[in-house]
Amino acid sequence: MASLRDQGNAAFKSGNFEEAVRLYSSAIEEDKENEVLYSNRSASLLALNRIDEARRDAEKCIELKPDWAKGHYRRSRVHEKMKEFQLAA
């Protein structure tokens, strides 16, 4: 059986972002310290225009692993979506 993360990835790839959020959220309940799960959920939330939630997940990802570029990329995508281009750079 595929992990919740893998199932979330499949849902995201198929464009089922609500399902991806649900699956990543369940995975986070099992592993609250996994920065990848927050990053993936952030991307899913952003695809749904749930910008504040996407920002929170990007920030949590950065908090968990400050030197991981993908967390910063997720936060930049949120700023870009909000047309905060100076902050996105």
Image (cartoon, rainbow, N blue to C red):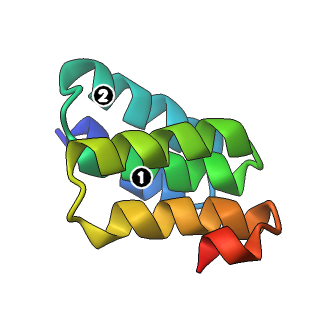
Residue at image location 31% in from the left, 71% down from the top: 69
From the top left corner, tell me how far across and down residue 2 is, in percent: 21, 43
Q: Determine if residue 8 is in view.
A: no
**Would you place residue 81 above or below residue 49 in this image?**
below
From the top left corner, tell me how far across and down residue 49 is, in percent: 77, 49
Tell me the SS state at disc 2: helix
From the top left corner, tell me how far across and down residue 22 is, in percent: 50, 29
Distance from label 1 to label 2 (Cα)? 11 Å
The amino acid on which the numbered mark 2 sits, given as a three-letter code, is Ile
Residue 83 picture quarter = bottom right
In the figure, is residue 19 to the left or right of 26? right
Depth check, front residue: 85 or 18 = 85
Sequence-wise first label, 1 or 2: 2
Numbered mark located on residue 28 in the image:
2
Residue at image location 18% in from the left, 27% down from the top: 31
In the figure, is residue 5 to the left or right of 12? left
Q: Residue beneath label 1, please?
A: 40
The amino acid on which the numbered mark 1 sits, given as a three-letter code, is Asn
**Would you place residue 72 above or below residue 12 in this image?**
below
Tell me the SS state at disc 1: helix
Q: Marks 2 and 1: in contact by CB < 8 Å?
A: no
Q: Quadrant of the N terminus?
A: top left
